[in-house]
Amino acid sequence: MKLIPQEVDFVQMVREKIGGNHFTNFIGFNIHTIEAGHIEGELELAQHHLQQMEFVHGGVTATVADIVSGFAAFTLVKKGQGVVTVEMKTSYLNPGKGHTLYAVGKVIKAGSRLLFCESEIYTRSQGNSILIAKASSTMAIVNPEDIIR
């Protein structure tokens, strides 16, 4: 299925949004691939990303899944709109052990108000990749005037 972005300059729009996403920047997640309905990025793992058994913390894994799904959805909205997570399910498949967390997010169905997304999260170390989690989520398109303040 070919997804059509609403804006010609959607890549720049996403880059600007990433720059202002404080939490994404705080944890050190870097998005390097931006395509219509598709985002890829990675995180160099540090001690503060790990839990007590030295695996990637489940909250970090879920956060990264949310980030790539959200930005994949964001590639398809109009300027001035945003997306928010309506629901998300994360399935943890393997312990997260490695040097880098690599994530792929994609839109699998784009509606006029909701976007259905999937993400895959991998750890990478010494040339090996291990799928540690898969997530499915629903993103809602929001307009600034719709947000209750």
Image (tube, rainbow, N blue to C red):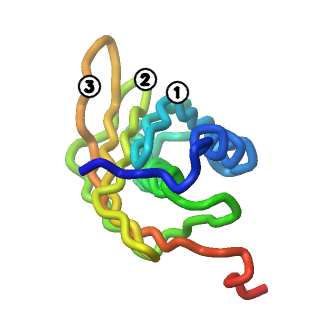
Q: Residues within 10 Å of mark 2 (few under 14, many from 20)?
A: some
* Dot 3 amino acid type: Ser
Residue at the (53%, 56%) spot, across then down = 6
Q: Nearer the viewer, residue 46 or 108?
A: 108
Look at the numbered discs 2 and 1 and tell me whether their residues touch, using CB distance below 8 Å. yes
- Residue marked by disc 3: 129
Q: In the displayed image of the protein, which residue is found farthest to the bottom?
A: 148
Q: Is residue 93 above or below residue 86?
A: above
Q: Nearer the viewer, mark 2 or mark 3?
A: 3
- Does residue 35 sit above or below 125 in this rendering? below
Q: Earlier in the sequence, mark 2 or mark 3?
A: 2
User: Considering depth in this image, is 112 or 85 the residue closer to the camera?
Assistant: 112
Amino acid on which disc 2 is placed: His
x then y, percent, for residue 95: 27, 41
Distance of mark 3 from mark 1, alpha carbons?
14 Å
- Distance from Cα at disc 2 to Cα at disc 3: 10 Å
Q: What residue does disc 2 label?
A: 99
